[in-house]
């Protein structure tokens, strides 16, 4: 199997766009502010925009699509044609496959958990007597961690695809000591006499 530049471009673009959305989600996290109720002596939480949830879920989808493409093309390392045994390309292929999946799973977990937590808004009205009451918001850094893991997943996916194509035999493996070289000279001479 030859390296396809279009597959590498698609994988890279999807990862980079997911990275941008994850950074955007970090920048646009919802924040809550306690506001006094005009009718009684209570406060309630008012939240800013919910764009971060949409950005996080978009990054989640793009990363999922990219991982699906790279593993669909390579048959997820397990279901494809044979890889050349005893080569460094096969070893690197397995290593980068693991790195790709670890980065992918970590990024997806951060994106999904961050989006869910960011979408959660405290509805209850707080009493004035609770001095430490604050509105529930997503901790800073969850989407940033997802962005970093997205880059790790991108590097792992690209190197996995590259090393997999180097080690892919296309179903054929070169065998040594087979064919004409296995017959002896005496057998060949006997065949000529007959």
Image (cartoon, helix red, strand yellow):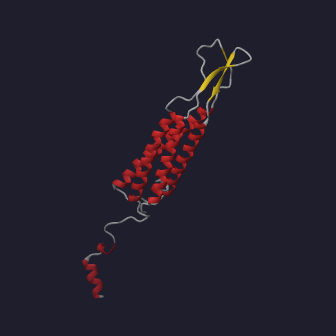
- Which image quarter: residue 188? bottom left
* Residue at image location 54% in from the left, 43% down from the top: 59
**Viewer-nearest residue: 170 or 181:** 170
Q: Residue furthest bottom?
A: 194
The relative height of residue 45 versus residue 147 in the rendered view (above or below) is above
144 left or right of 35 in image: left
Work out which quarter of the rendered image holds the C terminus and state it.
bottom left
The relative height of residue 75 versus residue 27 in the rendered view (above or below) is below
52 left or right of 164 in image: right
- Image coordinates of residue 110 in percent, x first then y, are 52, 37
The relative height of residue 5 versus residue 122 in the rendered view (above or below) is below
* Residue at image location 74% in from the left, 17% down from the top: 39
**Viewer-nearest residue: 146 or 179:** 146
- Image coordinates of residue 179 in percent, x first then y, are 34, 73
* Residue at image location 41% in from the left, 62% down from the top: 169
- Image coordinates of residue 115 in percent, x first then y, are 58, 36
38 left or right of 20 in image: right
* Residue at image location 65% in from the left, 13% down from the top: 128
- Image coordinates of residue 80 in percent, x first then y, are 48, 58
């Amino acid at each position: 199997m030859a390296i396809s530049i279009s597959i590498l471009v698609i994988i890279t673009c999807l990862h980079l766009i997911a990275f941008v959305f994850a950074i955007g989600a970090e920048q646009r996290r919802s924040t809550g502010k306690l506001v006094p109720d005009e009718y009684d002596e209570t406060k309630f939480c008012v939240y800013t925009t919910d764009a971060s949830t949409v950005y996080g879920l978009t990054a989640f989808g793009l990363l999922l699509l990219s991982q699906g493409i790279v593993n669909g093309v390579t048959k997820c390392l397990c279901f494809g044609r044979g890889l050349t045994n005893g080569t460094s390309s096969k070893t690197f292929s397995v290593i980068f496959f693991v790195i790709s999946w670890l980065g992918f799973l970590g990024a997806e977990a951060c994106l999904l958990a961050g989006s869910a937590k960011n979408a959660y808004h405290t509805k209850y009205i707080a009493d004035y007597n609770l001095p430490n009451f604050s509105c529930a918001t997503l901790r800073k850094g969850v989407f940033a961690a997802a962005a970093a893991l997205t880059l790790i997943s991108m590097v792992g996916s690209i190197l996995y695809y590259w090393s997999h194509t180097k080690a892919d035999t296309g179903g054929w493996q070169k065998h040594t000591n087979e064919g004409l070289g296995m017959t002896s000279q005496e057998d060949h001479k006997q065949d000529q006499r007959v």
